[in-house]
Image (tube, rainbow, N blue to C red):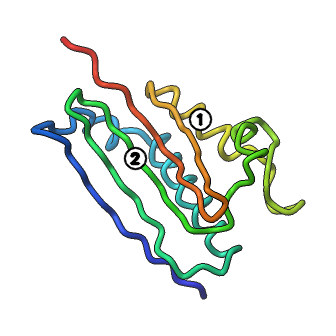
């Protein structure tokens, strides 16, 4: 059995308080989405043989926007492939290791909540960022 370390960070900029609390706790879709981002990080970390922890960071901006980052030090995503992440049936894994629908479906779940997913990679590890815009002003 391989054990993975996950470090959680919470950052609030200025005097802001997260105002999306109900979005995070109510939706099974968001729970699945966060699980998919963590599972991708776990698989990349395992493939690289890395012992670095996966970092999950939640940031609240002064305007109320939220960002959740899942940062791994796994195999990374080649620069040429980054533009294709999230396309249906696109995968960087070996044949038979997935259908290439995970990020595509996660993007759909994020969009239902007004959020977006982006990825960046420096060749050694990947950061997947789930970003919620500021809530509407009532």
Residue under label 1: 107
x 53%, y 53%: residue? 127
Secondary structure category for the residue under label 1: helix
* Side of 95 relative to 106 (left or right): right
Q: Position of residue 125 (x, y in %)?
A: 60, 63
In this view, the residue in front, 122 or 21, is 122
Residue under label 2: 68
Please give the label number shown on residue 88: none
* Side of 101 relative to 112 (left or right): right
Q: Position of residue 68 (x, y in %)?
A: 40, 47
Other residues around mark 1 within 10 Å, as few (<14) / some (14–19) / many (≥20) = some
* Quadrant including the C terminus: top left
Location of residue 87 by image quarter = top right
x 41%, y 39%: residue? 27
Q: Position of residue 45 (x, y in %)?
A: 61, 71
Q: Report the number of discs.
A: 2
* Side of 98 relative to 24 (left or right): right
Secondary structure category for the residue under label 2: strand
Q: Is residue 3 above or below residue 116?
A: below
Real-space Cα separation, disc 1 to disc 2, in angstroms: 14 Å
* Side of 48 relative to 2 (left or right): right
Q: Most extreme residue toward the left, as rendered?
A: 15
x 45%, y 48%: residue? 31
Q: Position of residue 122 (x, y in %)?
A: 61, 56
Q: Most extreme residue toward the right, as rendered?
A: 95
* Quadrant including the N terminus: bottom right
Other residues around mark 2 within 10 Å, as few (<14) / some (14–19) / many (≥20) = many
Mark 1 or mark 2: which is in front? 2
x 37%, y 41%: residue? 67
Q: Most extreme residue toward the bottom, as rendered?
A: 1
Mark before the other along the chain sequence, 1 or 2 = 2
């Amino acid at each position: 059995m391989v054990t993975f370390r996950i470090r959680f960070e919470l950052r609030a900029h200025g005097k802001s308080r997260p105002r999306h609390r109900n979005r995070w706790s109510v939706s099974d879709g968001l729970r699945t989405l966060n699980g998919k981002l963590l599972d991708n990080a776990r698989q990349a970390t395992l493939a690289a043989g890395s012992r670095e922890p996966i970092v999950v960071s939640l940031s609240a901006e002064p305007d109320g926007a939220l960002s959740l980052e899942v940062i791994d030090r796994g195999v990374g995503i080649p620069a040429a492939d980054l533009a294709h992440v999230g396309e249906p049936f696109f995968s960087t894994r070996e044949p038979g290791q997935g259908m290439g629908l995970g990020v595509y479906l996660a993007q759909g779940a994020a969009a239902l909540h007004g959020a977006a997913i982006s990825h960046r990679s420096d060749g050694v590890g990947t950061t997947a960022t789930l970003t919620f815009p500021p809530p509407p002003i009532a």
